[in-house]
Image (cartoon, helix red, strand yellow):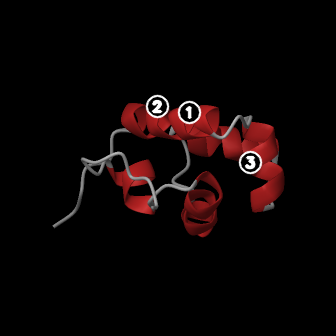
């Protein structure tokens, strides 16, 4: 079964996690090893960002599922 991913929810989850870490998209892009432009596309839901999802989740301290698949909890890695 294929999950429906809503870009707007992904966008808000990523932005929330960035704010909590006091980071900007360009900071995350640098840590992940991609361009600011590509990271912006991931955040806006234009690109799925498959090669970077695990690294993004680890840097932001959230689960990959919460960031990209709308898991119900807050997705924090405790």
Identify the image quadrant of residue 50. bottom right
Q: Label 2 crowding class (10 Å Cα cut-off): few <14, some 14-19, many 20+?
A: some
Can residue 44 be seen in the rendering of this structure?
no
- Of callouts 3 and 1, which one flags the residue occurring earlier in the amino acid sequence? 1
Residue placed under numbered mark 2 in the picture: 12
Q: Is residue 67 left or right of residue 31?
A: left
Do the residues bearing badges 1 and 2 touch, measured as CB atoms within 8 Å?
yes
Q: Position of residue 36 (x, y in %)?
A: 79, 42
Q: Position of residue 55 (x, y in %)?
A: 63, 65
Image point (67%, 38%), residue name: 40
Q: CA distance from mark 3 to mark 1?
A: 11 Å
Q: CA distance from mark 1 to mark 2?
A: 5 Å
Image point (56%, 49%), residue name: 47
Q: Position of residue 14 (x, y in %)?
A: 53, 40
Q: Residue furthest left?
A: 1
Question: In the picture, which quadrant includes the N terminus?
Answer: bottom left
Q: Which mark is residue 15?
A: 1
The local secondary structure at tag 2 comes to helix
């Amino acid at each position: 079964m294929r999950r429906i991913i809503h870009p707007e929810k992904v966008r808000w989850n990523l932005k929330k996690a960035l704010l909590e870490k006091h980071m900007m998209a360009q900071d995350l892009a640098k840590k992940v090893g991609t361009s600011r432009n590509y990271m912006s596309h991931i955040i806006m839901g234009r690109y799925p960002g498959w090669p970077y999802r695990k690294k993004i989740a680890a840097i932001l301290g959230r689960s990959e599922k919460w960031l990209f698949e709308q898991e119900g909890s807050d997705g924090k890695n405790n």
